[in-house]
Image (spheres, grey):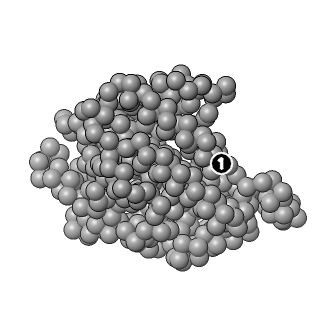
């Protein structure tokens, strides 16, 4: 039995650039005496971000946080109130919250247990079941699970075929959108969070990207009280504007992105290596980087979490038992069979993952998990994965994130 840590290893530590890197941008704010309301730093940040993603400034809308970005996008679809918004039960609370606050009713679907998400084919099957009429459905909100790529173009085709708008909750997918073809910017809008805990973290922030420039224009208007070209509210809106201070941090993160990504990649590679050594496959890739490290241990997530905590390692079942079990949403409509969501919730565990998590800490986390599973004869029922290589695509439970 190895020694217990003297201090708690936190599940994550947000990491913003050093203050001295921010000061030159902060100093540009005061002379203008413009601290918000689409100031010059914000406009430059939005333009820089668009250029960085390879899109036009008219194809991006940045706001003060990701949840408000989701709400403003749903409002921009101009959906009649009380229509259903289909979404996975396996998601974070912001997904159903945004639907409710946009005047829609969440309807929880089960996910594929390999990809952890809903697909157009899964939705088509639901529509064919006739449980609810198609005209009662206002929108679909698929979720990129912990930053993993999903097939955005298949949702473009879904909307073209059905006329039902789709908004992808891609909160953790900044790097995925940047580096995987299936998540490149296209017709279907995608929301990316810029929260401090995300891979591109600026404190608070969110952005919507889409090649549908009319939709982006409407989202921008909604984020500013529904103003269009005048001070008259052309439609229902709210205040989602990003301050100049948030934008200043965004500039610094863009300046530092190559280093930030390299540091994240090193931590990711170390986790993949050490989990591979003990025969487990984390929900990680070197092709798309994310800010969470989840490992799937069938039926043992809570027990392993408690064992880690006993060794002063914080761990978390990020999405609990699924959003449909949360008190705020337990009375919302759902499909009867959510067995895949239950299967994932019983096995998916988040472990410490920060930009500066050391090799020694990673080895300690993985060896502590291995210790518990070995003592509890876990590998008798679930043989260890083959230790061929550190290739992160050799997941035992992950196939393709397309349909």
Q: Residue at x 38, y 43 (%)?
A: 280
Picture coordinates of residue 243 (x, y %)?
A: 70, 56
Q: Residue at x 60, y 24 (%)?
A: 4
Picture coordinates of residue 324 (x, y %)?
A: 33, 34
Left or right side of 41 for 388: left
Picture coordinates of residue 173 (x, y %)?
A: 48, 58
Picture coordinates of residue 88 (x, y %)?
A: 32, 45
The residue that disc 1 covers is 356
Compared with 376, 385 (above or below) is below
Q: In which quarter of the image is residue 52?
A: bottom right
Compared with 132, 25 (above or below) is below
Quarter of the image with the C terminus in it: bottom left
Is residue 155 in sight in this rendering?
A: no
Q: Nearer the viewer, residue 50 or 164?
A: 50
Exactly how many numbered labels are in the figure?
A: 1
Is residue 305 in sight in this rendering?
A: yes
Q: In which quarter of the image is residue 92?
A: top left
Q: Residue at x 23, y 36 (%)?
A: 339
Q: Residue at x 31, y 34 (%)?
A: 379
Secondary-structure class at tag 1: loop
- The extreme right residue here reads 31
């Amino acid at each position: 039995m190895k020694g217990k840590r003297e201090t708690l290893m936190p599940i994550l530590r947000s990491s913003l650039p050093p203050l001295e890197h921010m000061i030159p941008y902060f100093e540009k704010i005061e002379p203008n005496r413009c601290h918000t309301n689409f100031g010059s730093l914000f406009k430059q940040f939005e333009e820089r971000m668009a250029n960085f993603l390879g899109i036009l400034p008219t194809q991006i809308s940045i706001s003060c946080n990701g949840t408000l970005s989701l709400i403003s996008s749903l409002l921009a679809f101009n959906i009649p109130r009380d229509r259903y918004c289909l979404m996975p039960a396996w998601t974070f609370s912001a997904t159903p919250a945004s639907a409710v606050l946009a005047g829609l009713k969440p309807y929880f679907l089960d996910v594929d247990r390999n990809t952890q998400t809903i697909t157009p084919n899964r939705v088509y099957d639901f529509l064919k079941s006739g449980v609810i009429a198609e005209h009662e459905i206002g929108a679909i909100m698929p979720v990129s699970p912990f930053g993993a790529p999903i097939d955005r173009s298949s949702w473009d085709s879904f909307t073209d075929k059905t006329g039902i708008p789709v908004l992808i909750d891609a909160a953790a997918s900044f790097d995925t959108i940047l580096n995987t073809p299936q998540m490149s910017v296209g017709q279907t809008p995608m929301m990316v969070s810029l929260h401090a805990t995300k891979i591109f973290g600026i404190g608070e922030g969110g952005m919507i990207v889409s090649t549908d420039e009319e939709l982006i224009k409407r989202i921008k208007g909604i984020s500013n009280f529904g103003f269009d070209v005048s001070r008259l509210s052309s439609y229902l809106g709210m205040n989602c504007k990003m301050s100049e201070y948030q934008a200043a941090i965004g500039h610094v993160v863009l300046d530092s992105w190559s280093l930030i990504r390299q540091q994240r990649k090193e931590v990711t590679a170390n986790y993949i290596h050490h989990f591979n050594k003990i025969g487990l496959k984390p929900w990680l890739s070197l092709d798309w980087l994310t800010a969470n490290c989840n490992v799937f241990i069938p039926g043992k997530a809570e027990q392993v979490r408690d064992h880690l905590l006993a060794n002063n390692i914080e761990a978390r079942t990020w999405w609990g038992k699924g959003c449909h079990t949360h008190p705020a949403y337990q009375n919302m409509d759902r499909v009867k069979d959510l067995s895949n969501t239950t299967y994932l919730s019983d096995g998916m565990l988040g472990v410490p993952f920060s930009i500066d998590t050391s090799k020694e800490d990673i080895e300690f986390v993985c060896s502590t998990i291995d210790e518990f599973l070995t003592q509890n004869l876990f590998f008798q029922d679930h043989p260890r994965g083959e230790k061929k290589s550190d290739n992160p695509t050799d997941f035992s439970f992950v196939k393709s994130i397309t349909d």
